[in-house]
Amino acid sequence: MWSWIVRIALWTLAGYLGSRLMKDGTPNGWLGNVILGWIGGALGSFLFGLIGIRSTEGMIGQILVSTAGACLVIWLVRKFNIGRWFDK
């Protein structure tokens, strides 16, 4: 149970860091950061796993991989103009 709480907290932090690094126009706020962190964490873990880098070694590694994944997700949102769905 605690591992999931810690993981969600790390993904939230990674989403926040990714949004600040990229200075994005994607959804902000806690929910937007959690979603961005989840997607970024999954994508980052998958892509880094393909090249042999595992993020399960420690908390810092998980944050770095998830933040890199979140930055990639933000870039994809911008590239394919997906952000227009969030503009109201």
Image (cartoon, grey):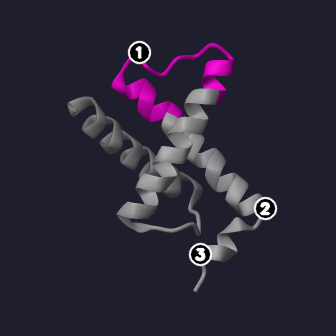
Mark in front: 1 vs 3: 3
* Label 2 secondary element: loop
* Label 1 secondary element: loop
Instruction: Residue type at mark 1: give it.
Output: Glu
- Reading the image, the residue beneath label 3 is 86
x, y percent for residue 81? 75, 67
Instruction: Residue type at mark 3: give it.
Output: Phe
Rendered residue at 60%/47% (across/down): 71
Q: Which mark is residue 57?
A: 1
Q: Quadrant of the N terminus?
A: top left
Q: Is residue 50 magenta?
A: yes
Q: Earlier in the sequence, mark 3 or mark 2?
A: 2
Q: Is 8 situated above or below 74? A: above
Q: Is residue 10 magenta?
A: no
Q: Quadrant of the C terminus?
A: bottom right
Rendered residue at 60%/81% (across/down): 87
Distance of label 1 from label 3 (alpha carbons): 35 Å
Q: How would you rate the neighbour count of disc 2 (Cα within 10 Å): few for under 14, some for 14-19, many for 20 or more?
A: few
Distance of label 1 from label 2 (alpha carbons): 33 Å
Residue most extreme to the front: 1
Instruction: Residue type at mark 2: give it.
Output: Phe
x, y percent for residue 59? 35, 26
- Reading the image, the residue beneath label 2 is 80
Q: How would you rate the neighbour count of disc 1 (Cα within 10 Å): few for under 14, some for 14-19, many for 20 or more?
A: few
Q: Is 63 situated above or below 38? A: above
Which residues are the magenta region?
Answer: 47-65
Q: Earlier in the sequence, mark 1 or mark 3?
A: 1
Where residue 56 sits, quadrant-wise, is top left
Q: Indicate left or right for 39 with 47 as reference.
A: left
